[in-house]
Image (spheres, grey):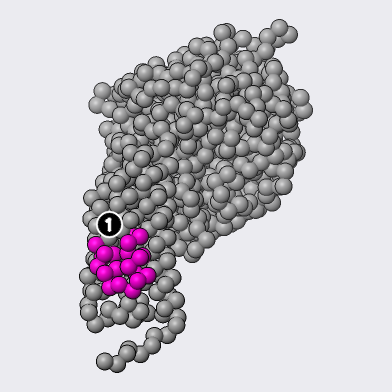
Amino acid sequence: MTNPAPYPSYSAWLARITAGVTLVFGLAVTVGGVWLVSLGGSLYYAIVGPLLLATGVLMWRRSRHAYSLFALVLLGTLAWAISEVGFNFWKLAPRLDMLVLLGIWMLLPFALRRLSIRRNAAWKPLAGVVGLSALVLLVSMFIHHDEIQGNLQGLPFDGVAQADTKDVPDSDWYAYGRTSYGDHSSPLKQINKENVGKLKVAWTFRTGDMPGKDDPVESTFEVTPLKVGHTVYLCSAHQRVYALDAATGQLKWKFDPKVRDDATWQHLTCRGVSYHETPDMARTIDGAEPPAECRKRLILPTNDARLIALDADTGERCASFGRNGEIDLNDGMTVKTHGFFEGTSPPVLTKQMVIMAGSVTDNYSTVEPSGVIRGFDVYTGKLVWAWDSGAKDENALPSATHHYTPNSPNAWTVMSADEKLGMVYVPVGMSTPDIWGGNRTPTMERYTSSLVALDISTGKRIWSYQTVHHDLWDMDLPSQPSLVDLKTPQGVIPAIYAPAKTGNIFVLDRRTGKLVVPAPETPVPQGAAKGDWTSATQPYSQLTFQPTQKLTDADMWGATMFDQLACRVMFKKMRYDGPFTPPNLQGTLVYPGNVGMFEWGGIAVDPDRQIAIANPMAMPFVSQLKERGPDNPAAPNAQHPPGSEVGVQPMYGTPYGVDLHVFLSPMGLPCPAPPWGYIAGIDLRTNKILWKHKVGTTRDSTPLPLSFELGMPMLGGTMVTGGGVAFLTATMDNYIRAFDVTTGKLLWQDRLPAGGQSTPMTYSENGRQYIVTAAGGHGSFGTKLGDYVIAYRLPE
């Protein structure tokens, strides 16, 4: 018998390396699998790990039985994977990818030659299982999961417009949500479902305002511009205001409030400015004739706690407003630390009033500025009223003997108003710190995470509804509420829709605060950290995007089986009993996460069709309390640290600090499987979600030029038009997209030069409709930064 011809040396080395890699795989899976079993997790990894070790040993010995054993491992893995997650490609992929690739590698000629099995057909079962696995993955790519297919027909327009739209020309966009109703909707219909695919860039404006070396991480370009007459108004991160020609995007004037760079701030954000026009026969609060200057004015909040009035035609300060055109929002505060009170969202303007809230530094200490809501005369800046949610006397004005209550709950997002009813609607947040509440008083907590209606003229509370009791998760109301005149068989109900971070949308009668859509109190997990307590129940709206099933370790994800195994171990190490699991020293999985299923973008409402378009997301967070120690002192021992809302937060004045971070795999991917972001259509007559589709790709989130449509996290909101089209720019990939509001079908998209973490708007100029969005990215979201404002229109 003759000896076989010698094999090339590289085949021997590759075969040895393959065996070694398989042994390493087996060792890693064995260790992780045993750890997972000890935590009460799946047995799969503890079984497969030793089998992979045995496969590696057989390969090292050049035994053909390695192929038979590995074929059984892969076949068993395929069966286990399908039993856990069905034919869901993105959940199957991390369970199968490494083993399928290893199987393909073992079938390459060098391996077959090295093991001398080409003629004995030991490789054929493995080839069959590899082919079957590849076929399952291929088929699963065409099966849709986690989506709702449906139609959102809506009502025909009956010719009766909502009260808020009558004072705003169809061609314009007067307020953050176009009107004080916060509907983010325009009746313009020149751009429609049939022609939206022809949109082209009409003009691009660059602000020149880019983050500096001393700016905080969360430097953002979240603005929704206004359009009044022939001018577009917007602000950039440093609260610089720009007036642009609506047809060309050319700069008319610019105002710089000289907000200094400061890395200790948590935010550097300007979501917009507010517009006011002096009506005929107007009077100030004191009954005087308004000043002749600034008949059209803009009100600008700043990050350094100022409120500035500008002439909308020239950009000059309105000298008769406050002191030389500005108000110091630190007046009446006990805590005046620079940057602790920030005006990040535009105020509500009514015929006579500027109603201003503000953002307060989160999770730093129990000694913070007040979250007081204040009403000022829109012409003079005179303080008319205050609503201090943490004070015994909610409406007490500051004096020599009285200051606003430190650390009372604030309202950092945009408010809405109904001037006909005389109410302003305040989405109230938290009294910081957010994650431990053992020292909160009943007075301090009575309005936390609540929707509150105040009298526009006096600031007196009319009604309130609490959406989270004793909030330990920062699950406040982050969005501008949307006011909708609901058309029902029993008549019109003036309703208010309040999206919450929990994913619930609370629907109430805006006259009384009574629920329109039921939100029954539901038992929630108990067991707060020492010194704290939890509410026995929480309200769950029947209009909700909150996941109906609790996460399990089978829901964990990753780029590979090792990534997924690590996520499963981390998941089992934490406490998680579903939503509202209390924070603790062990670490709590918060899902939906602290950033919320809804954020400041809110929802878009078409009041004519009685429909809404939402873009909920679900990003997991980890909240872990930290006991005091050398690295976590009980009181500040240094200058205020750099601003951030992630990482270890000191929570001075409480027994603990807290570590807040996104729940990520070792490779930086969210541990729960995608989708993480959707666009969805809601029928307001039935308050049912009739369609929901994932939105957003990986194109700008990975170093590889790959574009998988996973459904990505997003920051920003939707805008809907009379042409039956909804627009969205908020996703982590740099796109503006247009959707058919009836079905949710993607109609058009275009690449943006930077992240689009903003909410689009639309207007008409010279008979042509424009779609405008800011593309400047978001520092803490990790999207590409820029300074672009881009307008689209149809070609002539």
Instruction: Identify the residue shown where x is 22% and y is 79%.
Output: 120
Q: Is residue 756 above or below residue 588?
A: below
Along the viewing direction, whichever of 389 and 74 lies nearer the viewer: 74
Q: Which residue is mark 1?
A: 77
The N terminus lies in quadrant: bottom left
- Compared with residue 772, is residue 263 higher up or lower down, i.e. above or below? above
Residue 56 is covered by the magenta coloring:
yes
Q: Residue furthest front?
A: 1
Q: Check residue 129 for magenta coloring.
A: no
Q: Position of residue 261 (x, y in %)?
A: 73, 40
x and y, in percent, of residue 740 in the image: 35, 50
Amino acid under label 1?
Thr
Q: Residue furthest bottom?
A: 2
**Magenta range:** 52-72
Q: Main secondary structure of the magenta part?
A: helix
Q: Residue at left 48%, top 25%?
A: 472
- Report crowding for label 1: few under 14, some 14 to 19, many 20 or more residues within 10 A (C-alpha): some
Q: Position of residue 437 (x, y in %)?
A: 51, 20
